Structure formats: C-alpha cells, structure tokens
Amino acid sequence: MRRLLVYAGLAPFVAFAVLPFYWMAVTSLKTDAETYNLQAMPFLIRHGITGEHYALLFQQTPFLLWYRNTVAVSVLATLGSAAIAVLAAYSIVRIRFWGSDGVAVGTFLTYLVPPTLLFVPLSEVVGRLHLIDSYWALVLTYPTFIVPLCTWLLIGYFRGIPRELEESAMVDGATRLAALVRVVLPVAVPGVLTTVLLGFTLSWGNLIYPLAFTSSTPQKVLTVGLLTELVRGDVFYWGSLMAAALLASVPIALAYSFFTSYFVSGWTAGATKG
Amino acid sequence: MTVRAGALDTAAPRVPAVGRRRSAEARLGYLMVAPAVLLLILLIAYPFLMSLYMSLTDEYVGTPGRFIGLGNFVYLLHDDVFRQTAINSVLYTVVAVGVKTVLGIVLALLLYALPWGSRLFRGVILLPWVIPTALSTLAWWWMYTPPYSVVNWMLMRLGVISQPILWLSDPAWARIGIIVVNVWRGLPFYAITFLAGLVAIPRELFEAAETDGAGPLVQFRAIILPLLRPILSIVVMYSTVFTIADFEIVFILTRGGPMNMTHLFSTLAFQVGLVSTFIGRGAAITLFIFPVLAVASFFILRLVRAGEEYA
C-alpha cells in the first residue's frame, strides 16, 4: 500500500521530467501532415514514421559542421581545463605553500561566478585578441567556468586519497609529478572523470558566449546554430529543429547513463563539502 | 643558483635535506597552480575589473568611451525597461527558488521512500538537469507555441482550461511559462542534493521517534528539517545566484518580451550591451547580479567551512 503511494507520488514528477524529451522524439519522427493536424492525438504517431526531418538536417543545413565545431570546442576546452585543474588541485591539497588556502578560496568564489556576469568585458578581451567570430574564442573562454568547477571538485577528491600512497612511491625515488601521474591519478579516476564530464557538459551547452563571440555560420556551435539558423523567420522547421536538439542531446545523455552513480556522489560531495 | 642546486642534487644522497626539499616542493607547488591562477586573474578578475570600469563610461561600439561616473547607473535607475527588468528578475528568482525548494523536498522524500529501482528513477529524474538547457528549452518553445501547443492540449483534455493559453505572448502567462521551465530544469538538482542529505541522517533517529509515537509530520519537523538545514541553505543560495543570472530560458522563449515583461538582467544586458552596442550600459546592467553573488558566496563559504569542521 505504502509502496503504491510512493509510485503514485513519483509518477507526475517522472512524466514532467520526461515529457519534453518524448515530445522532441515524437515530433522529429512524425510527418508534417500529422504534426500540423489539430485533430490528431499529438502523443502518438499513427501515419508512419518519417526520416525526412533528419534528412533535411543532414543535407540542407550546416548541422554536421556545427556538431563538429561543438565537439572540437568542448574537447579542447575540457581537456585543457582538466589538466590545469588537476595540477592546481593536487598542489593545493598536497604541497602546502604560502597562499595555497587563498588559491583554494579563490577557485571556490570563481566557481560561484555565473558566465552571464562576465560576457560583456570578455567580448572586449576576445576582440583585442582578434578572436571575434572564431570558435577559438570559446576554447579560450570556456575554461573560465570549467577550471574553477573542476579544481574545486578535485580538491575534495584528492583530500580523500590517503597520503601514504604517493609517499611510498616517492620514498622509492619517484618525483612528485611521477607519483601524481602513476599513483594518484589512477586512484582518482572516478573523480577526474566526473569533473571532466561536468566540464564537458557545460561547454557543450553554453549559449551566451558563442552568441556573444561568434556570428558567421562556419564558426557556430550547435546551441547557437540551432537557435539562429534552423528557425527562419516565421517558417518553423519544428521537425528538423527537434531532430537536431535530440541528436545534440544524445552524447550527453549517454555519458551520464554510464556515469550516473559516480556523478551523483561527485556532485553532492562538491556541493556540500570540500 | 638553480644550476648549483641541480649539480648538488646528483651528488647528494637520494633523500635531500628536509629544508631544501621543502623549498623545492613549494616551488613545484607554485608552478603547478600557476596556470590556474593566471587564468583566474586574466580571464575572470581582470574582466571583472574591466566591467567595473566600463560601467562608468559611455562606451559605444567603435568609440573608446568617456568616463561618466555613475551616469549609467543613474540612467538605468530612471529607465522604465530596467526597472521592469529588476522587478522581473526578483520575481522570477523568488518564485522559482521557492517552488524548487518545496517540490525538491517532496521529490527527495519520495525517492528516499522508494523501495526499489531508485537508481533508474534517479537517472530519469536527473535528465532535465543533465541535458543542456539551451537544447531542452527548444522543446519547451515548441510545446508552448500555439496553435499546436501540446501543453494546452493536455490542459484542455484534463479540463483545467477551456480556452488555449497564449503562452509566451501574454505577459502574465509568459512569466509563468519561463518559471515552469526553470523549475523543470532545476528541480533534479534540488531533489538529488536533498536526497544525499536525507541518506546521511542516521536511521536510528527515525526508529527512536517511531517508538516514541511520533508521526511522519512530527518526524519531518523535528528530525528532517533541522538536520537538512545546512544543505538546504547552501542549495538555496547557490541556486539563487544561478537563477537570477539565468539567460538561456528567457532568451530562447521570449527574448525578454512581451513588452519587456520577462527580461532578466542578463538578457537585457545582452540586448543593450551587445545588440544595441551600448557597451558601458550593458556592463552596468550585468553588475546588478554581483551583490547577490557576493552575499550568497559569503554565506555559502561560511556554511561550507562549518561543514568541514564537522567532517
């Protein structure tokens, strides 16, 4: 009885969470005739599945180019940020030097800075570096939100790894860096993966920086491309737009389905304590 | 100096004197944080100072901008659109954070009471928070668009409304519409974090309460709420910063319309600073997010530090 009540209580939350994704998928597979028929039952596909929206996306829009740009920007920004963050977090936790606490607080405070606070001055910085309308501007600026996040989370992980592990390696003659790479990182794989994944997701989905720094079609990433070019005037290509949003979401959804448990523990550890 | 130290190292025993090793370690430490510190200074601290300065100039695209003191702020405080934006931002944040907190607690309690399948449920519940907002909001846009709005279709079928709602073009409904999407996106974060807090409460407390004859409501008020308070406050403050600084949902759904009734600080700053290129004024608008950030970070830092002492 109590069990039933719990499921009944959860059902609306689950429906609410899933609805937009279900709606994306259904719209992307339905024929226009059925989508724009107000008498039809909108949640079902009764007149056959069509691939025409996907075909239009691949053949008549720069969708694949934007996809490629998004992958390139996200991978470069995330890997660069992860390297910076691993070094910083490790050094803050293990090598105590004058000012290390200050740096830790600094990363925490910048981790709380939303990207929308800085896009105006950053567009000046990007302009001075002659990176306006280039996706390299994104590779340069995305670390401003990835590095603080990753560093802060990694500080927590590294604290949880016993000091003795690398100390014994160092007594055996390994240098600090060698101990970090060969002893600490393998143990910290779940933590590092979680932070990398979080950073990657934030890069993949950022909208305001690409909107502010890029404008020509070949330099766009998915978020901006879909919003500015798949919606043309008053003519909406809802089928293709939904197909595009769905395909753009798939890599993130897949990554999380593999890492959910890591990710939940990582996130809550980072959000509630150092 | 470095050459000598290097030469000595090869000759010296493998484990060098403690003092020298310390200073070499400290140097390595500085070297390792250097990239992060440089990034924080060059791409966060410096731009922040820049925006402070820019907000005091009348910079317009292509002109260097003259120093005009607090001119932009005086202008904004007398500007109807900006005043409306400030009201919108506060309203949006207070309502969204409030609803997310209440529903977040409910959802966390349900997940906590779940007998099995909690992993699967957690995964599904997390989707709205995991998938980038800039993508999922496109689906919401389509769900709100008349005459095909599936939200209207459902509400009419359920008998809640008899006429289609003009989501996004009616000022009041547009506000509700963007808040719904914000709640949809943020709820998983609240629920999962609260759930982590619930799981950490020792089961014996509930058992003891039950033997004393305390019902669920009493247990909630006497055990759950007080023990959940630190996490609750951190989540609420953290989320307040990111809700008031929100951009994607409003930009995609309404661009601040109808009649500026849904503009938030960030969308107005984008419009004024980058589209109309009144850069100085745009910078001034973004700075209104800063006090919220400052207050919230002060309290979060204090709470996190208190938590560390207990841990």
Image (spheres, coloured by chain):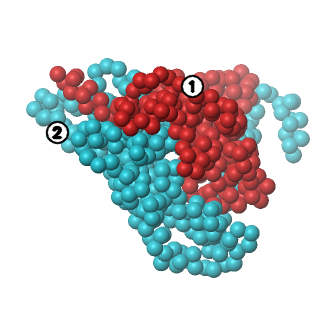
The residue under the point 71% across, 21% down is A172
Q: How many marks?
A: 2
Disc 2/disc 1 C-alpha distance (Å): 53 Å
Q: What residue would you read off at disc 1? A: A51
Element class at badge 1:
loop
Q: Is residue A228 above or below residue B63?
A: above
Query: How many residues crowd around disc 1 within 10 Å: few (fewer than 14), some, or many (20 or more)?
Result: some
Percent of width and height locating residue A224 = 62, 46
Q: Which chain is disc 2 placed on?
A: B
Same chain for the residues under marks 2 and 1 in the image: no
Numbered tag placed on residue A210 in the rendering: none
Q: The cyan chain is which one?
A: B
> Horizontal placement of B267 versus A203: left or right?
left
User: Can residue A199 be seen in this snapshot?
Assistant: no
Q: In this view, does A194 lie above or below A96?
A: above
Q: Quadrant of the C terminus of chain B?
A: top left
Numbered tag placed on residue B217 in the rendering: 2
Q: Which chain is disc 1 placed on?
A: A
Percent of width and height locating residue A150 = 59, 39
